[in-house]
Structures are given as structure tokens and as C-alpha cells.
Image (cartoon, rainbow, N blue to C red):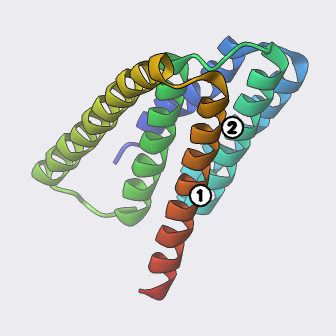
Amino acid sequence: MNRIWAGLPIAVIAAVPLWTGASAPVYGIELVAILICACGVLAYSLSTVSAGAGLAIIGYTVALWLSGDGVAVIGAAAFGLALLSLLAFSEFARQFRGAAVARSVIRGQIIYWIGRAALAFGAIILLILMASGLAALVPAAGRAVIGGLGAVIAFAGALYAAMRRTES
């Protein structure tokens, strides 16, 4: 698989934070994140790509904090889908490094990636619609409680997934 395709998600995970809040710290963090991700892709190292992606998330967080604006849903969705794609491309390239892969396998993998991105995009649209409806029904104090509960549930789900993965 041509590793050049991983350049597109790397560009997106660097561009979204800069679009959100361009400042010197964000430029620095995103530059280091790009370099780490590129080194990971070139070395077929998923852990290095993950470290670069984590640094890109920190850069996005700093950009959101410094801008003082709310989260742009489209930017956040593009950032998340780019992270998902980068990790998927990197893992696929790592697994089949040096192997001759049939066109039908690559075609099937691309269809899988597009389907997964479409499913994630549909979930984003559904969550936006649900959040809009909930915002109209729930007072401001209740929204903070619901947001905190959602964060706790997401953290618990990630912990559960990590524990299940280490068991097998």
C-alpha cells in the first residue's frame, strides 16, 4: 500500500487546529505532531503514529482553549474522521508491509473504510440532531450534568474496550 495516502489525514489533523485558533503554541504543537506522524508512517510504527495523533489532539485542545470559541462541529468531525483514517491507513500498511496485496483486497478495504466513515458521519449527524433537540428541552444547568455524564460513560467505555483487548 502506498504510504502517501496517510498524508491526507495528517494534513487534516494539522489544519483543523490551525483553522480553529492559529497561534504560536498551536503551530509548534501541530508541527511536532506532523513530524511524529510522518515518522511513524514511514517506519510502519503504529505506536509512533498514535503518539503523533495524541499530540495533535493536544494541539486541537490548546487551539480551542486559546480561541475561546465553542467547538465547530464540522471541524471536530473532520478532525475525528482524519484521526480514524490515519490510524486505519497506518495499521493496514504495517500489516501488509512488503507483501503483494491483491487489488480485490485493497478494493474491499477501501469499501470498508468508506462504509465506516459514512457510519461515523451518520452518527455525527444523529448526535447533532439529538443535541439540538435536547438543548431546547433541558435548562442550561442540566446540560452540564448531561455533558459530564456523557464524558464519564465515554471514559468507562474506553476503559472497558482497553481491558477487553488486553485479555485476548
Residue 50, percent from left and from top: 61, 53
Q: Place residue 92 in its image quadrant.
A: bottom left
- Which type of secondary structure does the marked residue at label 1 adopt? helix
Disc number at residue 56? 2
Quarter of the image for residue 53 reads top right
Q: Which secondary structure, mark 2?
A: helix
Q: Residues within 10 Å of mark 2 (few under 14, many from 20)?
A: many
Residue 2 visible in rendering: yes
- At which x and y percent is residue 1? 34, 48
Residue 166, relative to residue 133: is it above or below? below
Kind of residue sitting beneath label 2 = Ala
At 50% across and 35% down in the image, what residue appears?
80
Residue 6 screen position, x and y as percent? 47, 38
Residue at left 55%, top 59%? 46
- Residue 155, numbered label: 1
Q: Amino acid at mark 1?
A: Phe
Residue 44 location, x and y as percent?
53, 58
Foreground residue among 166 and 4: 166
On residue 83, the disc is: none
- Identify which residue is drawn at 67% across, 29% down: 141
